[in-house]
Amino acid sequence: MRKLIYGMNLTLDGYIAAPGDDIGWGGPPSDELFQFWSDQLQATDLSLYGRKLWQTMSSYWPTGDQQPGATPAEIEFARRWRDMAKVVFSSTTDKVDWNTRLVTGDAVAEITRLKAEDGGPMDIGGATLAGAAMRAGLIDEYVLATSPVLVGGGTPFFTALDSWVNLNLVETRTLPGGVILSRYETRR
């Protein structure tokens, strides 16, 4: 059975985007934070995206390695992202590319099916998609890169749940700029 990991950058008050879908609150990531996410991507067999996050990622990373001034880390990340297997869950998107498959049906049923397959870890991104997986009890690990900024509202990292989810802290460390990386496993 595959492990499902939900991880994103978020504000100290728990938002992945400020009002208006503004993700500029974090500024450019430090080299260490960027490398952390690149290493996470390297260790992932399959990435699951909701529509909004897919649109954000696919608007830049397919050619991120060809952008003027791209750093070696950005070039490496762009190539990893482009080459890895991805699934996009959307009822409004009609075309995907870059080693990606589109699912328009029941996301929870498909994620459950994918988890039951043999293979390495999967990551999930996008608040709505991850929220559905969270409510269904499908998330095995949470990875938070918490920035020292308060935005007061927007898109929350965590969704409303029907019952408690107990977690075990696996790792925590502080990166430049005061970003705190935390990794939690779901207690089952």
Image: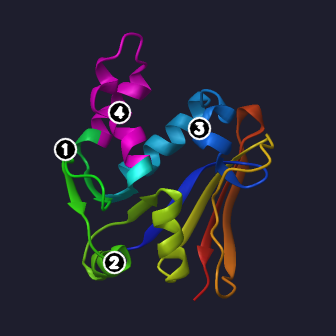
Q: CA distance from mark 1 to mark 2?
A: 23 Å
Circle 3/circle 2 CB separation < 8 Å: no
Q: Position of residue 94 (x, y in %)?
A: 21, 52
Q: Amino acid at mark 3?
A: Leu
Q: Residues within 10 Å of mark 1 (few under 14, many from 20)?
A: few
Q: Which numbered disc covers residue 97?
A: 1
Q: Position of residue 118 (x, y in %)?
A: 25, 77
Residue identified by numbered label 2:
115
* Residue 64 part of the magenta-drawn span: yes
Q: Amino acid at mark 1?
A: Asp
Q: Amino acid at mark 4?
A: Ser
Residue identified by numbered label 3:
33
Q: Tell me which segment is drawn in magenta.
A: 53-81
Q: Secondary structure at mark 3?
A: helix
Quarter occupied by residue 2: bottom left
Q: Amino acid at mark 2?
A: Lys
Circle 4/circle 2 CB separation < 8 Å: no
Residue plotted at (25% across, 65% down): 103
